[in-house]
């Protein structure tokens, strides 16, 4: 089970309203608990010796929820092949400004250099600056301000030419 599948499982459990889900597979044991403040936490992820997978709570639904998302993630990449996609390195809340009273980091049409700050992502009360990986011009902002983002979610399209 890779990180993306675990993140999708956490998202699904949070939306489903289940208070706890335990999942045991060949090499991984995961317990996900949702608290009263709607935050989801992974309590354990340790290797186990059991050979047969044991699944508790809503098991078939997470597998069904994971399948449709894979094609959707690959579709945007094929549309804009000449652009470089800047993706989120973490899960959190996307902000275009350093603070509410400041201007946005970048707009469509802004020329950026490698290392320029494009946005911040808040994760667990920490604000992480997301820097440009390439020099070029911002072609499109793919995420609305103050919205949640997933790991590896496209944030910006940059024209490197």
Image (cartoon, rainbow, N blue to C red):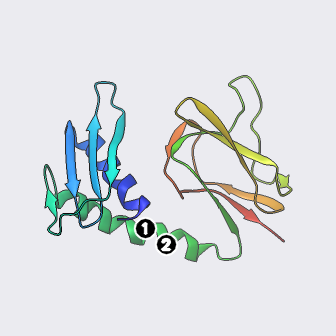
Q: Residues within 10 Å of mark 2 (few under 14, many from 20)?
A: few
Labelled pair 1, 2 in contact (Cβ < 8 Å): yes
| Residue name at image x 28 percent, y 43 percent | 32
Residue 50: image quadrant is bottom left
Residue 6, numbered circle: none
Q: Foreground residue, 88 or 137?
A: 88
| In the image: residue 96, left or right of residue 20 | right
- The residue tagged with tag 1: helix, strand or loop? helix
| Residue name at image x 59 percent, y 38 percent | 145
Q: Foreground residue, 63 or 135?
A: 63
Q: Foreground residue, 117 or 27?
A: 27
Position of the C terminus by quadrant: bottom right
Residue 128: image quadrant is top right
Q: Where is residue 158? Give x, y as percent.
A: 74, 62
Q: Where is residue 116? Give x, y as percent.
A: 82, 49
Residue 26: image quadrant is bottom left
Q: Where is residue 43? Give x, y as percent.
A: 33, 41
| Residue name at image x 34 percent, y 65 percent | 1
Q: Where is residue 104? Give x, y as percent.
A: 74, 37
How many numbered markers are drawn? Answer: 2
| In the image: residue 33, left or right of residue 7 | left
Q: Residues within 10 Å of mark 1 (few under 14, many from 20)?
A: few
Mark 2 = which residue? 75
| Residue name at image x 13 percent, y 52 percent | 56
Give how far apart the Cα atoms at labels 1 and 2 are. Answer: 5 Å
Q: Foreground residue, 87 or 127?
A: 127
Mark 1 = which residue? 72
- Outermost residue on the front side: it is 49
| In the image: residue 48, left or right of residue 75 | left
- The residue tagged with tag 2: helix, strand or loop? helix
């Amino acid at each position: 089970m890779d990180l993306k599948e675990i993140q999708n499982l956490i998202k699904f459990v949070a939306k489903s309203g289940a208070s706890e889900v335990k999942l045991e597979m060949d090499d991984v044991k995961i317990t996900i608990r949702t608290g009263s403040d709607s935050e989801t936490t992974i309590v354990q992820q340790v290797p186990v010796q059991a050979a047969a997978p044991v699944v508790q709570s809503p098991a078939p639904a997470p597998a069904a929820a994971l399948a449709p998302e894979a094609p959707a993630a690959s579709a945007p990449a094929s549309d804009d092949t000449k652009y470089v996609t800047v993706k989120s390195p973490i899960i959190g809340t996307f902000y275009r400004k350093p603070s509410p009273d400041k201007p946005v980091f970048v707009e469509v049409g802004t020329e950026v250099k490698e290392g320029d700050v494009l946005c911040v992502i808040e994760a667990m009360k920490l604000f992480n600056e997301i820097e440009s990986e390439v020099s070029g011009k911002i072609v499109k902002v793919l995420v609305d301000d103050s919205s949640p983002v997933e790991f590896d979610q496209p944030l910006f399209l940059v024209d490197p030419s």
